[in-house]
Amino acid sequence: MRDRPDGLREDDLRLVLAEGWRIGAARLRYAAVGGGSYHWAVRDGTGRRRFVTADDLDDKAWLGTARPAVMAGLRSALATALALRGDAGLDFVVAPVPGCGGDVVRPAGPRYAVSVFPYLDGPAGRWGEPLPGPERAMLTGMLAALHGSAPPRLARVAAIGLARRADLDAALRDVGRPWRAGPFGEPARGLLAGASGRIRAALATFDQLAGAARASPFVLTHGEPHPGNVMRAGRRLMLIDWDTVGLAPPERDLWMAPGEARRYAGLTGRALDPGLLSFYRLRWALDDICAFAHRLRSAHGRTADAGHAWTALEQTVASLGDSGGA
């Protein structure tokens, strides 16, 4: 996230870290990375570093619509990651650091939730930039191990449907009237108006394919194992951002690993379904359109994050209908 969180001060963050983890934050450095949470690199008085995340409970629709439900979903996801690393022995999982009393996440006021992670020295990949072949093979091995693990008791089922489907349906019904909630409202309205037929057709295809996804065997999936969530730590790869972890068909992960279907089948004995790969590719695009349309119909300013939402909406709508396999 490029913008700072609205209504969360660094003093609030220091207090949560002190009370929840006994961390005396001598230095906080905001890290404008990632696309779904706010991050800081934190150094305590001894020089020890940690990576701290604040999640906006109003902006994680896949976990729920009300703040208590989102907090419960976030707690379940992070506890699942902790169990995968500790109990299942999946050491590529970057799990949260439990706080006092074992909490993996604590509230910071009514709107935000804070979690703490180990600080990793090493570069992360970038969304849209394919991993080199050896690293792609390593990631496929990691996903095979994850999918073969016994799901922790707290693991949730990942939704098949679109979290903000109702928002997109409302936006498409509203394209005949001006959107005056912010500077990108009218451009977004014009874009969706011109592409409404294509978007509705994609939604119809999505609905037709969703039944096959619901009927497919489920495994424990990461949800977003794209290059931006892969970090290189020495010779190892680490998988970060586990707030999307959930039970789902393996294709939920593997559509993001093009060219790896044969390797995955060799590791797991499980052949991937091309139809489900296409379904999850389409789901990703539609989920993004839902989220960006919601953002730009709502009150916003000319900020870096709003500008990113507009650019990403343009790109996603333009690419809608692209297809391919793993």
Image: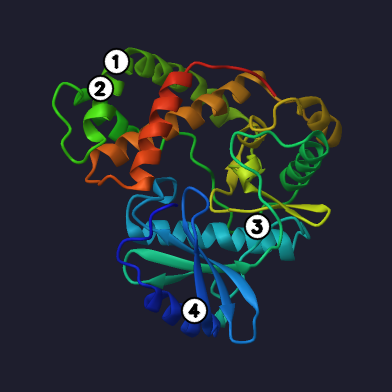
State the mark number for residue 217.
none
**Residue type for callout 3:** Pro
Sequence order check, earlier mark of 1 and 4: 4
Q: Which residue is mark 1?
A: 194
Q: CA distance from mark 1 to mark 3?
A: 45 Å
Q: CA distance from mark 1 to mark 2?
A: 6 Å
**Residue type for callout 4:** Leu
Q: Which residue is mark 3?
A: 152
**Residue type for callout 1:** Gly
- Name which residue lies at 38% across and 46% down: 305
Badges 3 and 2: C-beta atoms under 8 Å apart? no
In the rendering, at what x and y percent does residue 56 appear? 38, 58
Badges 1 and 2: C-beta atoms under 8 Å apart? yes
Q: Mark 2 falls on what kind of element?
A: helix
State the mark number for residue 190.
2
- Would you call the spot at circle 4 few (<14 residues within 10 Å), some (14-19), or many (20 or more)? many
